[in-house]
Amino acid sequence: MKKFAFIFLLLLVSQSCSDDFDSLNKDSKNPTNVPAGFLFAASARQVSDLMHNSNVNFNIFRLLAQYWTECTYIDESNYDLTTRNIPQNYWNSMYARVLKNLDDCKGKVNADGLLDPAVKKNQIACIEILNVYTWSNLVNSFGNIPYSKALNSDDLYPAYDDAKTIYADLMKRLDAAIASISASDGFGSSDVLLSGDMGRWSKFANSLKMRLAITLADVDATTAKAAIAAANAGALQFGDDDIDMHYESATPNTNPIWVDLVQSGRKDFVAANTMVDLMNGLSDPRVFLYFTTDAAGGYSGGIYGSLNNYATFSKPSTAITAPDASATWISTSEVEFIRAEAIERGFLTGNAADNYNNGIKSSVLAWGGTVADADKYIADAKVAYATAAGDYKQKIGTQKWIALYNQGFIGWTEWRRLDYPVLNVPTGTPGTTYNDIPRRLTYPVQEQTINAANYGSASSAIGGDKVQTKLFWDIH
């Protein structure tokens, strides 16, 4: 009996040791089997942080759009993209932390045999809308990129797809997502963007479709017109809330700008004179909503691209730097400006001035201004659609750029597309000209070395891997 008891004890100890050793081989902080809801939430939060943060290792879009400028370290506002490997950091994060997670998420949802079919369709639609949002940002950053082969782990050297071809496929994916949305639940509490509201997801998707379509307007008017006409009724309407990522006042779910600038105590950025001079000249009521007062009690911006004294100039306001400040993905204001431009191009019927005015009003109200503020501003001859300077591209381009403040990437994209307003030439690098303002990001260094053949083909196809190379839709 004692012998059997001893053997049983040995077996227990052996099993216990085996379990202990197995547990040591598992990384509890990086589980191998992550539920679809967690992957979806992580992807949405990651892409929001990437497109919204102010960390110059990843995101310099507010500098490229000339909303902000730098104080002590001015490399990025003089278009040095390589010292910090900015394109590579941005590229890797978008592919690995957003698109790969979404791909895994989609696979898990499709494989879930117990999921209600209507809920499954909604979840796939949400994944696809988030995919289209992410892919479109990458295409509009670089041009031709790995797409059809990009997420295949067996293909370590993916070929690059043509940017216009990618656009066409993204539009198809968006159409399929919109058509499949129903009133059933989506990702529920795992939906950190829209809290499972599929009606809002439909508005987001249709608004995104209008954004992509108007970007194509100069190169494929037929496709742009059809897409805008189809999406218009289902997109955000005047008076709707913007599509925002809502952050929280407590870490770790805080606004990344607060993390970058306030929590870290950094004093890297001030308002750019490009932005503040234009707003002051128009007596824009949003200037005090966008920025703090300067050392003299007024509003002024540092000289874009130069060394600037942080204490002297206006800084981003607490509406942007508060820990719980939201990140806008797409706004009612943007959609109203798209409608105004679409009317001017003959894509929609209506009065462009009405939508132009709605675009301004939506922005003023979203930032905390009043209807009276907006009406007074719109009535000014320098702003009124009938009397403001220039053609419709200048009128809409200028006001849309102002309204897109704190959406640096879209502000930069709209400047590239409409060519307004006129930006400043950086003064920190002698010899820089207006033509040197980036029209795209250069490809990551790793692509030049690891994926050299496909990198070379892509560079040749777009006209050279340079910041001055215009993307296929940027023809003016």
Image: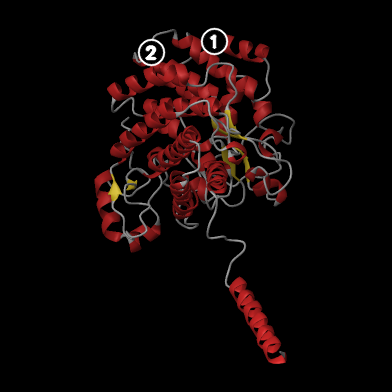
Find residue 446 and report its horizontal and vertical position in percent.
39, 60
- Residue 373's disc is none
Check disc 1 and give the amino acid type. Ala
User: What is the secondary structure assignment of the residue under circle 2?
Assistant: loop
* Residue 307, above or below 274: below
Depth order, front residue of 111/395: 111
* Residue 10, above or below 461: below
User: What is the secondary structure assignment of the residue under circle 1?
Assistant: loop
Residue 219 visible in the shown view: yes
Residue 383 visible in the shown view: no
- Residue 348's disc is 2
Q: Earlier in the sequence, mark 1 or mark 2?
A: 2
Q: How is the image coloured?
A: secondary structure
Q: Residue at x 49, y 37 (%)?
A: 123
Q: Quadrant of residue 275?
A: top right
Mark closer to the observer (1, 2): 2
Q: Is residue 381 left or right of residue 316?
A: left
Residue carrying label 1: 381
* Residue 99, above or below 21: above
Depth order, front residue of 4/422: 4
Question: If the image is split into quadrants, where does the C terminus sit?
Answer: top left
Question: If the image is split into quadrants, where does the N terminus sit?
Answer: bottom right
Asked if marks 1 and 2 touch (Cβ < 8 Å), the reply is no
Q: Residue at x 70, y 38 (%)?
A: 324
Q: Residues within 10 Å of mark 1 (few under 14, many from 20)?
A: few
Q: Is residue 447 left or right of residue 52?
A: left
Q: Residues within 10 Å of mark 2 (few under 14, many from 20)?
A: some
Find residue 237 and report its horizontal and vertical position in percent.
53, 17
Find residue 137 and report its horizontal and vertical position in percent.
44, 40
Residue at mark 1 to residue at mark 2: CA–CA distance = 26 Å
Depth order, front residue of 160/410: 160
Check disc 2 and give the amino acid type. Leu
